[in-house]
């Protein structure tokens, strides 16, 4: 197995130029969630050229390619997400987005290139490989969910069932980590998330006679202040949680009290008990404010994503493989991130391992995800491919090889 891994590493470096071409192709033609038609067509054509068995139209524009190894073994899966974001790119490079107001600002173009590269590389070694390899190209990770879309929809469609997957892996680019370095965790990796909708209902009145109405804008200001005080002083500070509002809407004229204000935000957490404590506490706070102000305050909670938890046993195996492939100095433990995503739906059906790949130019300034200035270092692409292909090749063996 050591010899095969060395050959995989060398071949991954040899595919660096092709990976960059693929990444730039996807970057120039980004598509929003639920609209990944062209992206899916490019993926399908590439996988079919490799001779994989391809299924299309899963949970929207999702694609699955299956590669069979030459020896008996386990089925393993690799997931890459495909959608872009409604962001106008500011990076002025020849391969900048050609779609106005849409950009791969979360690195899914990298994920696509690495996923396709892994399919190519492993197909070249298929006669020497054990098991089956399921390459999952997922739409609508950025959401918002529409019915059974995204990871949830693909799992419901049975992408982990035929063949029955024994392990599923994925990566995400990390702009705050030097190119080619890996961060991982053996348990909770990313936060769970809820979408919160807060509706404050008052009574409309003329701006000159506010005493005849109930001002929901004023009550909303009280609500926001009370939320922050509650989180700071009534929830244990050692329990990570974040509650932020990104949208507020209310009123229709400067001299008329609004009748309703709506806020939309998100709650993120690393423990289910903390989530429940926050939600119960908010409802108590709002009940008190309702009594004090006369306004109606309604909290609607829409669960978005569960917490992303790596399987501890699989993580131990994966770290051993990655250390052999990349060297122990490139791997670091991570603190759980407060961002969220939908890979947990895969990890709930099969042991999952999710890790982060550094894409920052060494010594350079990090550009945040979801930023119009996001410009990841393509030197990380062969490292990501080495990690993906090497992980899959080892994990598909009937027994974990000695490295």
Image (spheres, rainbow, N blue to C red):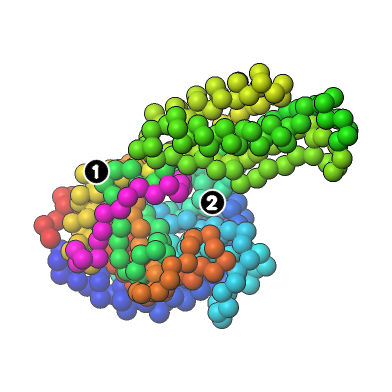
Sooner in the amino-acid sequence: mark 2 or mark 1: 2
Circle number at residue 14: none
Read off the magenta span: 327-343
**Rendered view: 362 above or below 201:** below
Please give the residue where the numbered disc 2 appears in the rendered image: 142
**Rendered view: 238 above or below 186:** above
Q: Which residue ends up furthest to the left in the rendered image?
A: 402
Please give the residue where the numbered disc 1 appears in the rendered image: 312
| Residue 388, quarter of picture | bottom left
Element under label 2? Answer: loop
Q: In the displayed structure, does residue 73 sit left or right of residue 241? A: left
The residue shown at (47%, 67%) is: 367
Q: In the displayed structure, does residue 309 sit left or right of residue 198? A: left
Question: Residue 81: in sight, yes or no?
Answer: yes
Instruction: Inspect the magenta stretch and tell me whether residue 87 lies in it.
Output: no
Label 2 crowd (10 A; few <14 / some 14-19 / many >=20)? some
Gap in Å between the C-alphas at discs 2 and 1? 27 Å
**Rendered view: 101 above or below 267:** below
In percent of width and height, residue 127 lies at 24, 64
123 or 206, which lies in front? 206
Question: Residue 145: in sight, yes or no?
Answer: no
């Amino acid at each position: 197995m050591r010899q095969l891994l060395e050959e995989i590493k060398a071949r991954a470096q040899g595919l660096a130029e092709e990976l960059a071409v693929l990444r730039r192709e996807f970057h120039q033609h980004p598509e929003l969630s639920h609209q990944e038609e062209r992206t899916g067509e490019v993926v399908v054509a590439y996988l079919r050229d490799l001779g994989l068995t391809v299924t299309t139209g899963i949970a929207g524009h999702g694609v699955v390619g299956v590669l069979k190894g030459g020896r008996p073994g386990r089925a393993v899966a690799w997931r890459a997400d495909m959608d872009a974001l409604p962001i106008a790119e500011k990076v002025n490079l020849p391969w900048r987005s050609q779609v106005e107001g849409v950009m791969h600002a979360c690195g899914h173009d990298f994920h696509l290139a690495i996923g396709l590269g892994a399919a190519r590389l492993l197909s070249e070694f298929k006669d020497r490989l054990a098991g089956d390899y399921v390459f999952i190209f997922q739409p609508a990770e950025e959401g918002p969910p529409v019915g059974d879309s995204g990871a949830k929809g693909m799992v419901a469609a049975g992408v982990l069932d035929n063949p029955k997957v024994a392990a599923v892996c994925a990566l995400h680019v990390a702009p705050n980590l030097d190119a080619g370095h890996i961060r991982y965790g053996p348990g909770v990796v990313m936060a769970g998330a809820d979408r919160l909708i807060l509706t404050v209902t008052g009574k409309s009145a003329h701006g000159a006679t506010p005493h005849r109405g109930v001002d929901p804008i004023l009550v909303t200001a009280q609500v926001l202040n009370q939320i922050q005080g509650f989180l700071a002083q009534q929830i244990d500070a050692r329990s990570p949680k974040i509650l932020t509002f990104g949208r507020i809407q209310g009123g229709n004229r400067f001299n008329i009290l609004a009748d309703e204000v709506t806020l939309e935000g998100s709650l993120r957490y690393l423990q289910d008990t903390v989530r429940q404590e926050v939600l119960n506490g908010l409802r108590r706070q709002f009940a008190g404010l309702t009594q004090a102000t006369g306004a109606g305050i309604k909290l609607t909670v829409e669960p978005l994503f569960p917490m992303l938890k790596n399987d501890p046993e699989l993580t131990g195996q994966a770290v051993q493989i990655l250390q052999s492939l990349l060297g122990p100095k490139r791997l670091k433990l991570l603190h759980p991130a407060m961002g969220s995503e939908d890979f947990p739906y895969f990890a709930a059906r099969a042991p999952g391992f999710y890790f982060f790949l550094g894409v920052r130019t060494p010594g350079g300034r990090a550009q945040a995800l979801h930023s119009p200035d996001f410009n990841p270092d393509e030197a990380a692409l062969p490292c990501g491919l080495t990690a993906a292909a090497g992980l899959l090749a080892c994990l598909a063996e009937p027994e974990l090889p000695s490295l």
